[in-house]
Image (cartoon, rainbow, N blue to C red):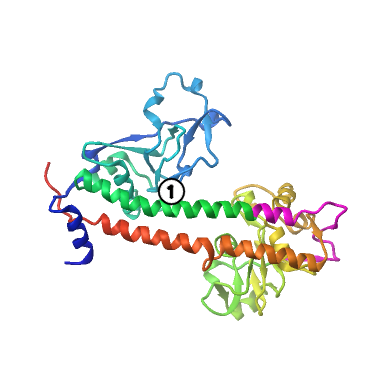
Amino acid sequence: MNQESGYINRLLQGAEVEWKKLGEVAEFQNGFAFQSARFKEVGLPIIRITNIANDNVDLVDVKYFNPDDYKNANLHNYVVQKGDVLIAMSGATTGKIGYYDLIESAYLNQRVGKFIPDKEVLNNRFLYHFILTKSTFLYALAGGGAQPNLSSTMLKEKLLIPIPPLAVQEEIVTILDKFTELTTELTTELTARQKQYEYYREKLLTFEEGEVEHLYMDDERIGKFIRGKRFVKNDILSDGVPAIHYGEMYTYYGTWTDKTISFVSKDLVDKKKLRSAGRGSIIIVAAGETVEDIGKGTAWLGEKDVVIHDACFSYTTILNPKFVAYFTRTKQFHTQIKKHISSGKISAINARGLGKTKIPIPPLAEQERIVAILDKFDTLTNSISEGLPKEIELRQKQYEYYRDLLLTFPKKRKST
């Protein structure tokens, strides 16, 4: 007998576990087709698929509605209350599960569903923890690909759920909730530190006009922009000449780096005359799906030159490179560049637009002092190997291990 089955048997103490179809132990409510043209900035909140993330439900970028716009609709069926378990039914978040833990009631939008378990046999929180183990199955059930789509029929017929006695479900929930509470506490602390970091970053990089000189970034006295040249993902190798693809600026690189995760061949560099950035340059991303994506800078501190994509600019400057990179991540920087960004399917900015951004020019010693302070905040909030993010990652893995251990039951389904 392995560790997992032994642990479960001790927990069950001889009690049997039935496997049931979801439809046998829970009802399921699909969302209401609220009209986007009637979305309001105030009113009653609407839960959309974008509000289901990180195993939770948030009200970030929430939309609202006025009930007077839907007088003939029975909206009572679509109410979301504290303790409800929700699921995204289509789109990029298909199969994502969210636990609604807010006091304020909200309403289900179309493409979002709500589980309504039979309380006599199924604990709602037990259901939540179990379904989190089924994200891969749910995505496959939805058809995967570019347009996955779940249906309530699929869920009720295809999703099998173990039903141990309610007392066992409650004990499992108590154990798993302890792990999630610790992770939540750490995440809350990290969020607070991130906000503190952003506050001090903004404060340290803000100077009055008379306090220090402010110059346009393309002023020849301090720096110049050079745009990269195009290469595609198929050109990327595991070794060769260091290279940064623009997409990696959003997913991998922070304020500075001295090594790359991608490389290209020397032959490609020569053939396409690809452009490179030298040590001390700042790589600034110039294209993305949203306006908010544009302009983030990463100081290149590697010994070798790094090839840059044509959706990036290299900014060569006499200023401290980290000082500039931190500046590109401030609100004051983004407020200035927004008016120069062209919006469309892909948003973008050119060198002229970036160059018309003013940057404060404190003495180099002051730049270094500011960088030293922000580096400490950066380590605490963003480092993969140090600080709270690593602790949260470890706690999440610990939770997932015990979740799989506690929710592994014999796959024997009783007839009903």
Q: Is residue 243 visible?
A: yes
Q: Position of residue 390 (x, y in %)?
A: 49, 64
The residue located at (29%, 43%) in the rendering is 155
Q: Position of residue 381 (x, y in %)?
A: 57, 60
Q: Position of residue 66 (x, y in %)?
A: 52, 24
- In this view, the residue in front, 391 or 361, is 391
Q: Is residue 161 visible?
A: no
- In this view, the residue in front, 24 or 231, is 24
Does 150 appear in magenta? no
Does 203 appear in magenta? yes
Q: Is residue 123 above or below residue 270?
A: above
- Magenta-drawn segment: 198-226
The residue located at (13%, 50%) in the rendering is 16
Q: Which residue is mark 1?
A: 93
- In this view, the residue in front, 317 or 268, is 317
Report which quarter residue 299 is drawn in.
Answer: bottom right
In the displayed structure, does residue 140 sit left or right of residue 294?
left
Which quadrant is the N terminus positioned in? bottom left
Q: Tag 1's secondary structure?
A: loop
Report which quarter residue 79 is drawn in.
Answer: top left
Q: Residues within 10 Å of mark 1 (few under 14, many from 20)?
A: some
The residue located at (34%, 48%) in the rendering is 142
Amino acid type at circle 1 is Thr
In the displayed structure, does residue 366 sit left or right of residue 283?
right
| Number of on-image labels | 1
The residue located at (67%, 56%) in the rendering is 329
Which quadrant is the C terminus positioned in? top left
Report which quarter residue 322 is drawn in.
Answer: bottom right
- In this view, the residue in front, 291 or 175, is 175
Q: Is residue 98 above or below residue 366?
A: above
Q: Is residue 391 above or below residue 102?
A: below
